[in-house]
Image (cartoon, rainbow, N blue to C red):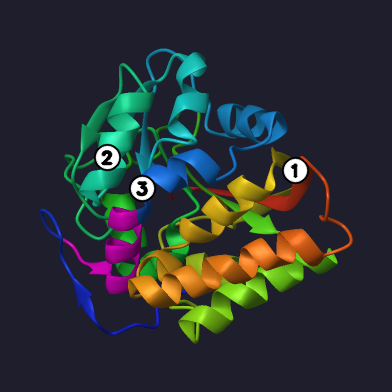
Amino acid sequence: MGDPLDPDRFSPGAGGAVNRAAAIGFERGAEVYEQARPSYPAAAVDLLVGVLDLRPGRRVLDLAAGTGKLTRLLGPSGADLVAVEPVAAMRDQLLAAVAGVTVLDGTAEAIPLDDASLDAVVVAQAFHWFDARAALAEIHRVVRAPGPTGPPARLALVWNQRDEQVDWVRRFGEILVDAAGAKPYVDDTDWPAVVAGAGGWGPLAVRRLDYEQPITGEILVARAASTSFVSALPAAERERCLDEVRALVRAHPQLARRESFAFPYITHVFWCDRI
């Protein structure tokens, strides 16, 4: 988690700017992203429905929605869902996977919605790609101001973080970063401090949840391929990285000769009030 480092940014769609590694990697890797990336734990979805007061009559934005991994889980709440996603291939996957949702091209820094038109915004697995200060100002614009009665308008941020206390998970992450040379964002950003520094938002609350994704060796390789900075590599370098992941599956004592296994994650859910 963190803020983008790569200065080579461009806009692939209407308004805003997308980190180059994210734009190229997610455009190439949208299909494997949908195949291999984890969903979110039921407890996290229940928490979001509760703290955002998602129900019929409430309008919520899934910002940088990707292939709709979270969007589809919020549908049963009955809220009016809008998804904004700047990468065309990701939007195509979302449209194929999730029915009844308005899907728009846009970025966190240039949201294509009217002022005060939303009751809540959720960002899953994406805020680390944003220009945080600009994005928080833009989210503040599109979320309604608090009223004298009724529930607060809120922002929620969600991440599935690989549990690298598990040896093979740590090694998996090292393979990906070694292939790319570096991550295009900073890990371990202090998000409460970022939100507090931006102004316009109340204190950021947080809940931590454990989560496991059942996978196979093939899905682990696809999970590597879905990583933006791996997908963005030249073909030969990308294939060398995936070969190292295949070797990890064959050789690591926790994975070798197993048809399936659990990929452990730590899910972080943050939320705050618009003020």
Q: Which residue is mark 2?
A: 91
Labels 1 and 3 touching (C-beta < 8 A)? no
Q: Of callouts 2 and 1, which one flags the residue occurring earlier in the amino acid sequence?
A: 2
| Marks 3 & 2, CB-CB < 8 Å contact | no
Q: Main secondary structure of the magenta part?
A: helix
Per the model, the C-alpha gap separating discs 1 and 3 is: 23 Å
Q: Nearer the viewer, residue 84 or 199?
A: 84
Residue depicted at x 28% and y 85%: 7
Q: Amino acid at mark 2?
A: Arg
Looking at the image, the residue that sits furthest to the right is 253
Label pair 2/1, CB-CB below 8 angstroms:
no
> What crowding class fits label 2: few (fewer than 14 Cα within 10 Å), some (14-19), or many (20 or more)?
many
Instruction: Report x, y in % for residue 171.
Output: 73, 72
Stretch of the chain drawn in magenta: 16-28
Residue ID for mark 3? 30
**For mark 1, what is the residue?**
211
Residue 145 location (% of width, % of height): 34, 41
Q: Residues within 10 Å of mark 3 (few under 14, many from 20)?
A: many
Q: Nearer the viewer, residue 166 or 57?
A: 166
Q: Is residue 121 above or below residue 178?
A: above
Task: Point out residue 215 in the picture as x, y percentages from the top left corner.
Answer: 69, 41
- Residue at point 82%, 45% (across, down): 258
Q: Nearer the viewer, residue 214 or 208?
A: 214
**Which label lies toward us, 1 or 3?**
3
How far apart are the two marked residues, 2 and 1, measured between alpha carbons? Answer: 26 Å
